[in-house]
Amino acid sequence: MSSSLGVGLIFGFQPPLIALVLSRSGISAAIIGAVTAATLAAVIVCGPLYPRLIERLGLKRSVIAGIGTAALVLMFMPAASSVPMWLCFRFITGCALGLSWIASEIWLNTISGEESRSTVMGMYGTVFSIGIIAGPVLLELTSTEGWRPFLYGAVCLLATLLPLLVLRGVETPVDTRTPLAELLRAAHFAPIVMLAAVVAGLVESADLALLPLFGLHAGLNESAALLLVTLFMVGNVVLQMPIGLLADRFGRHEILAVCSVASALGPLLLPLCVGAPVWLGLLLFLWGGTLYAFYSQGIALLGEQFPAAELAAANTVFVMVYCAGGVIGPSLGGFAMDLWPRAGLPVMLAGAPLLLLAGLGARAVHRVTR
């Protein structure tokens, strides 16, 4: 849980910091976007290597190596003097964080029992989101000038490793050396889980990147537009545990279906609620919480459907698919806004959860008719 807080912290801290630093240097928004996306691209590229690395290092050492490397790179980032160097630093950060990210999820799935797996993963989603929210807060305390924010960020990242010092050893699932063919087989074996991953990545990234822009287009001032993302993330932090408890009691696929409906209604109701602050806040709170359940409950389903020895392959594919959605989401959402300024983004954000709902419906029909 502590290491997931560290990974979330970097995802919330590094992108806005780098964007502001590069913007002051006169770098275009398109190039800043490419630098930001380099981390997710690195996870996709390195995905086939992670199971073998986890097998060699073990879960505990994989988490330590990933976060330690990311912290070291963060310390040296201010020395970057060109866009290629920034791209390189962000890519290395993505490679390192991907290792910690996947190892921590395998770890949680391995130790959580079947009856409480969704609750544990809901807790994991909550902690991860707290880390994301803490990133901008840390920037407020450190400013974005010079070496100071990078050094403070690295120290905070390393601090999340302290609880690991009390652990003597952690059992690693056997047979995690997984060829590419096994990764593809894992994706084929659990299509609903992988669909949840790509929808989560696509919609989450589009929301975080484009909700403020949608608010500005709808007539909100800059402060109110930025608040949209905050309310969205608060819902994620508060609701993951209750959703996990419900999933353990009533079934993970059933709760995913309910969350799909709520996540499709949220963006469709957004234009109607922009002028009503109370309803807008409640809508974003519920929408954010149900949307992020796609990821946390998708991870729980991995633990349910795959034996421990195959979790490395399955979890790696899940994260790779999620990151692919994260790379596509902002571009697709921006295209939708250009094509249909008032309703393009809400329609795109609603359409993705409906795809997951359709997949869940097809699964239910297949189980009944089989």
Image: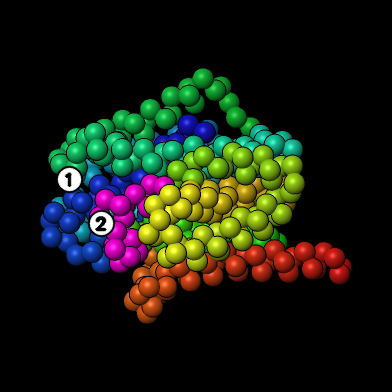
Quadrant including the C terminus: bottom right
Characterize the local packing of mark 2: few (<14), some (14-19) or many (20 or more) Cα atoms within 10 angstroms.
few
Residue 305, compared with residue 357, is above or below; it is: above
Mark toward the start of the polypeptide (1 vs 2):
1
Total labels drawn: 2
Q: Which label was assigned to residue 79? A: 1
Q: Amino acid at mark 1?
A: Ala
User: Where residue 204 sits: x, y (%)?
Assistant: 46, 57
Mark 2 sits on what residue? 221
Question: Is residue 306 rendered magenta in the image?
Answer: no
* Camera-side residue of 23 and 60: 23
Q: Residue furthest left?
A: 25
Estimate the spatial distance between the alpha carbons at disc 1 and disc 2, rounded to whole Å: 36 Å
Residue for point 74% across, 42% down:
249
Q: Name the secondary structure under disc 1.
A: helix
Residue for point 25% across, 60% down:
32
Residue for point 40% across, 43% down:
132
Residue 94, compared with residue 139, is above or below; it is: below
Q: What stretch of residues is rendered in magenta?
A: 214-231
Residue for point 49% across, 41% down:
237
The answer to which image quadrant residue 91 occupies is bottom left
Q: Amino acid at mark 2?
A: Asn
Foreground mark, 1 or 2, reads 2
Q: Name the secondary structure under disc 2.
A: loop
Q: Which label was assigned to residue 286? A: none
The answer to whether residue 215 is left or right of residue 177 is left
The answer to which image quadrant residue 19 occupies is bottom left
User: Where residue 304 sits: x, y (%)?
Assistant: 72, 47
Which coloring applies here?
rainbow
Q: Is residue 182 visible?
A: no
Question: Is residue 215 rendered magenta in the image?
Answer: yes
User: Where residue 301 sits: x, y (%)?
Assistant: 67, 50
